[in-house]
Amino acid sequence: AALNPWDVMLCVSGTAIACENALVVAIICYSPALRSPMFVLVGSLATADLLAGLGLILNFVFQYVIRSETVSLLTVGFLVASFTASVSSLLAITVDRYLSLYNALTYYSERTVLCIHTMLAGAWGVSLCLGLLPVLGWNCLHDRTSCSVVRPLTKSNVTLLSASFFLIFIIMLHLYIEICKIVCKHAHQIALQQHFLTASHYVTTKKGVSTLAIILGTFGASWLPFAIYCVVGDPDYPSVYTYATLLPATYNSMINPIIYAYRNQEIQRSMWVLFCGCFQAKVSFRSRSPSDV
């Protein structure tokens, strides 16, 4: 079959995603110091995005090399599970950031660790179940009229996935609004303790709010078009519409390592050690706390 340029772009995107996130996973596994709940969550996100990138590559290979309905179902299920785990990990990171600010005094406790592990277990469990649905029979291979814009998923399947995404997006939006309120309140209290509002107070507050807006805006801009099209789109529409909304969704997994991993100075330090074999003492690093935004 002739190569579809959109499939090639998805494969290239998957390759970039896999390389970026494989590095993050290697750094976290290599560095014993990166074992706090925050890095466990970042590791979960990187692992999910790494699997999603590999899934895009495998989907390209099997589509043009091994043409099989069974393989197609397995690949689609793998992609659904991986991307669901990625979005769920983003929600877990948002909850973690909120808890680190709302319960700052009790954040570093065994209860928090248990909460984080429970969230991740639930996220990966739900993702695995959603990924198995097409394989277990929730597909349109034998009923073309029930197909969605993402074959071989059914309309009801993609509606469930889209509804889950909208719910996660609303929860994240609410939590980030609460985080903004807490950040602004803390900055204002610090300024009042100094008996005057300094320029740095406004700069710090503005920076924190801007960072949160970038995080949520990137997530929404990447996934919302595809989630909306899955609900309103018709399988008879040209496939280019599906590709045009799906490709930006994959970019979220490409941007995640930059936002959540490479900006962290502990991970930057571990990269120095990993690639250089030594760390230059003259370079100063400040470890970010989980509440840093």
Image (cartoon, helix red, strand yellow):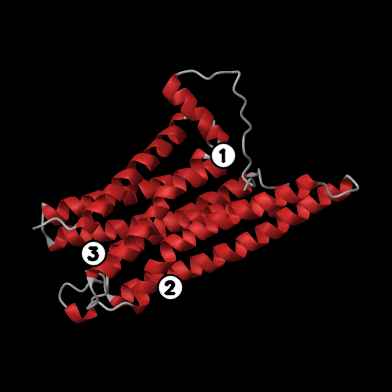
Q: Which of 270 and 103 is in front in this view?
A: 270
Amino acid at circle 1: Ser
Q: Name the residue under label 2.
A: 163
Image quadrant occupied by the N terminus: bottom left
Q: Looking at this view, is 93 or 148 the one in front? A: 148
Name which residue type carries label 2: Ala
Q: Is mark 1 on a helix, strand or loop?
A: loop
Residue 129 falls left or right of residue 39: left
**In front: label 2 or label 1:** 2
Ranked by sequence position, the earlier of labels 3 and 2 is: 3
Residue 124, visible in the rendered structure: no
Q: Is residue 143 left or right of residue 203?
A: left
- Horizontally, residue 203 falls left or right of residue 45, namely right
Q: Residue at x 51, y 65 (%)?
A: 169
* 203 is higher (above) or lower (below) than 67: above
| Residue pointed to by mark 1 | 36
Q: Which of marks 3 and 2 is in front?
A: 2
Q: In which quarter of the image is residue 152?
A: bottom left
Residue 166 image point, x, y percent: 47, 70
Q: Which residue is drawn at 55% across and 38% down?
A: 264
Asked if residue 242 lies left or right of residue 189, the reply is left
The amino acid type of the residue labelled 3 equals Val
Distance CA(mark 3)–CA(mark 2): 21 Å
> Could you tell me residue 63's position as x and y percent?
15, 56
Q: Nearer the viewer, residue 140 or 210?
A: 210
User: Residue visible at 87% across and 50% down?
Assistant: 192
The span from disc 1 to disc 3 (Cα, nearest Å) is 36 Å
Dot 3 alpha-carbon crowd within 10 angstroms: few under 14, some 14 to 19, many 20 or more: some
Few, some or many C-alpha atoms within 10 Å of disc 1 (few <14, some 14-19, many ≥20)?
few
Q: Residue at x 44, y 69 (%)?
A: 164
The earlier-in-sequence mark between 1 and 3 is 1
